[in-house]
Amino acid sequence: MNAISERMARELVWVWQTVRDTDDIHVVVLRAAGDRAFCTGVDVKGDGGWFLKSNVWNSFDPGVWVSPKIAHRCWKPVITAVHGLVAGGGQYLLNEADIIICSEDAAFFDPHANASIVSALEPIGMLQRGVPLGDVLRWALMGTEERISAQTALRLGLVTEVVDREQLWERAHQIAATIAERNTKAIQGTIRAIWESLDMTRSTALQNGMAYTHIGNPPVAERRATPRRNGPPTYR
């Protein structure tokens, strides 16, 4: 069910740092193995509370390890393709994705309340993505008794597209291939400016973004236009 174990978390640390430091990698597609679930949260059975330490002040948020941007400063685009169940801590893998699509069988819920555990970090990440406050609270408080369907996730802005299960991975790779054709430095600068703006006032974010246009844009004479593919643009 793809629960996040300590081993998986450590492997994701390596993945995000490798992606960040490898110039030939332009885009990441994150998808899950198996049929039933994308991720059922943090594994508290196999490893126990592997992120909890005997000294409570040394405990840490597992999301810091598994998320590309918050700790690893990886500004390359992440396209996340979701199928099946996404429970609780599985939201860590979505909250810092740049584009999320899902199949019709995707379902999102939070079991923290059932286990008498505070749900805080995952829903805060959902708020940063623009999911409405009332819907985030409902997700966090209703526990396993209620799930967000794929179509509701689309309406709330949690995902940007819903496709048939058979088309999910192909569609994710289509999106990734389109982005991969662009100038990778420009794409990374765009992503960094947008994500950093979430922690800034509007005026500060605009100043920060303006600086990035000077840092990341090549001189006009050196800019390369990427031709558009044949055929009309797609609509969604």
Image (cartoon, rainbow, N blue to C red):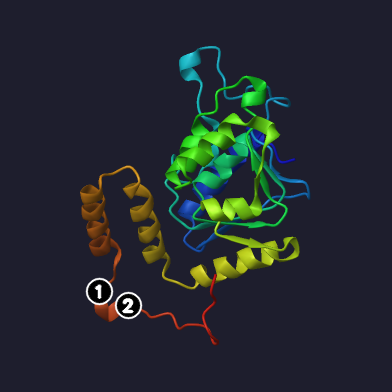
Image point (59%, 51%), residue name = 153
Callout 2–callout 1 Cβ contact below 8 Å: yes
Residue at the farthest right position: 35
Residue at the farthest top position: 54
Image point (68%, 25%), residue name = 44
User: Image quadrant of residue 200?
Assistant: top left
Q: Position of residue 233 (x, y in %)?
A: 51, 80
User: Image quadrant of residue 143?
Assistant: top right
Q: Residues within 10 Å of mark 1 (few under 14, many from 20)?
A: few
Q: Secondary structure at mark 2?
A: loop
| Residue nearest the viewer, comparing 136 with 179 | 136
Image point (46%, 57%), residue name = 76
User: Image quadrant of residue 6?
Assistant: top right
Answer whether residue 202 is visible to the viewer in this image. yes
Answer whether residue 64 is visible to the viewer in this image. no
Q: Amino acid at mark 1?
A: Pro
Q: Is residue 178 above or below residue 200?
A: below
Q: Is residue 185 left or right of residue 147?
A: left
